[in-house]
Image (tube, helix red, strand yellow):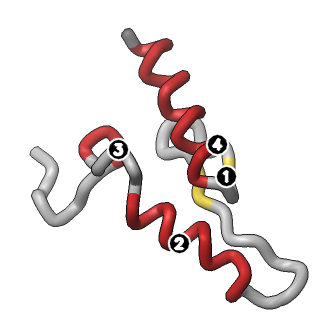
Amino acid sequence: EIPTSIATPPQSPPGMPTLTSMLTNNNCVPPGLVMHMPCYLCKQPFSDVTKLSEHLILHAIEIH
Protein backbone atom coordinates (compact mmCIF):
# COMPACT_ATOMS: atom_id res chain seq x y z
CA GLU A 1 0.00 0.00 0.00
CA ILE A 2 1.31 3.44 -0.96
CA PRO A 3 1.36 6.03 1.84
CA THR A 4 -1.08 8.88 1.17
CA SER A 5 1.74 11.42 1.48
CA ILE A 6 3.48 9.93 -1.57
CA ALA A 7 1.46 10.38 -4.76
CA THR A 8 2.88 8.47 -7.69
CA PRO A 9 2.05 9.79 -11.18
CA PRO A 10 -0.97 7.53 -11.77
CA GLN A 11 -2.47 8.80 -8.51
CA SER A 12 -1.46 12.44 -8.85
CA PRO A 13 -3.79 15.16 -10.18
CA PRO A 14 -4.12 15.24 -14.01
CA GLY A 15 -2.38 18.63 -14.24
CA MET A 16 0.62 17.32 -12.27
CA PRO A 17 1.03 20.61 -10.34
CA THR A 18 4.20 19.57 -8.50
CA LEU A 19 5.98 18.50 -11.69
CA THR A 20 4.70 21.55 -13.55
CA SER A 21 6.10 23.78 -10.82
CA MET A 22 9.46 22.02 -10.82
CA LEU A 23 9.91 21.98 -14.58
CA THR A 24 8.78 25.58 -15.10
CA ASN A 25 11.61 26.63 -12.80
CA ASN A 26 14.18 25.59 -15.41
CA ASN A 27 15.00 29.29 -15.79
CA CYS A 28 16.27 29.27 -12.16
CA VAL A 29 19.00 26.68 -12.71
CA PRO A 30 22.57 27.72 -13.59
CA PRO A 31 23.30 28.47 -17.27
CA GLY A 32 23.99 25.34 -19.29
CA LEU A 33 21.94 23.08 -17.01
CA VAL A 34 18.35 21.90 -17.50
CA MET A 35 16.15 20.27 -14.87
CA HIS A 36 14.78 16.90 -16.03
CA MET A 37 12.12 14.65 -14.58
CA PRO A 38 12.51 10.97 -15.52
CA CYS A 39 9.56 8.81 -16.46
CA TYR A 40 8.97 6.57 -13.44
CA LEU A 41 8.44 3.56 -15.74
CA CYS A 42 11.22 3.74 -18.33
CA LYS A 43 13.47 6.49 -16.89
CA GLN A 44 13.39 8.58 -20.09
CA PRO A 45 14.17 12.20 -19.06
CA PHE A 46 11.74 15.05 -19.74
CA SER A 47 12.17 18.79 -19.28
CA ASP A 48 8.60 19.61 -20.35
CA VAL A 49 5.59 18.53 -18.30
CA THR A 50 3.31 18.37 -21.36
CA LYS A 51 5.61 15.91 -23.12
CA LEU A 52 5.95 13.87 -19.92
CA SER A 53 2.16 13.75 -19.57
CA GLU A 54 1.77 12.60 -23.19
CA HIS A 55 4.47 9.98 -22.62
CA LEU A 56 2.70 8.63 -19.51
CA ILE A 57 -0.53 8.37 -21.50
CA LEU A 58 1.31 6.18 -24.04
CA HIS A 59 2.46 3.91 -21.21
CA ALA A 60 -1.13 3.70 -19.96
CA ILE A 61 -2.32 2.70 -23.44
CA GLU A 62 0.38 0.02 -23.65
CA ILE A 63 -0.57 -1.37 -20.23
CA HIS A 64 -4.28 -1.59 -21.05
Q: Does residue 31 lie above or below 35 as drawn?
A: below
Give the alpha-carbon distance from disc 1 to disc 4, as whole Å: 7 Å
Q: Looking at the image, tell me whether mark 1 or mark 4 is earlier in sequence order.
A: 1
Q: Which residue is mark 3?
A: 14
Mark whose residue sits in front, 3 or 1: 3
Question: Would you say the residues marked 1 and 4 are in contact, meaning their CB atoms lie under 8 Å apart?
Answer: yes
Cα–Cα span, label 4 and label 3: 13 Å
Q: Amino acid at mark 1?
A: Phe
Give coordinates of residue 59: x percent, y percent. 50, 24
- Determine the image quadrant of residue 30: bottom right
- The residue beneath circle 2 is 22
| Residue type of the residue flagged with mark 4 | Lys
Quadrant containing the N terminus in the rendered view: top left
Please identify the residue farthest to the top as the structure is shown.
Answer: 64
Tag 3: amino acid:
Pro
Rendered view: 48 above or below 51: below
Q: State left or right for residue 29 relative to residue 14.
A: right
Local secondary structure at mark 3: loop
Q: Which residue is mark 4?
A: 51
All told, the count of numbered labels is 4
For numbered disc 4, what is the local secondary structure?
helix
- Callout 2 amino acid: Met
Q: Residue at x 37, y 9 (%)?
A: 64
**Residue at point 35% right, 44% down?**
14
| C-alpha distance separating marks 4 and 2 | 14 Å
Badge 1 is on which residue? 46
Closer to the chain start, of discs 3 and 1, is 3
Q: Of discs 1 and 4, which sits in the foreground?
A: 4
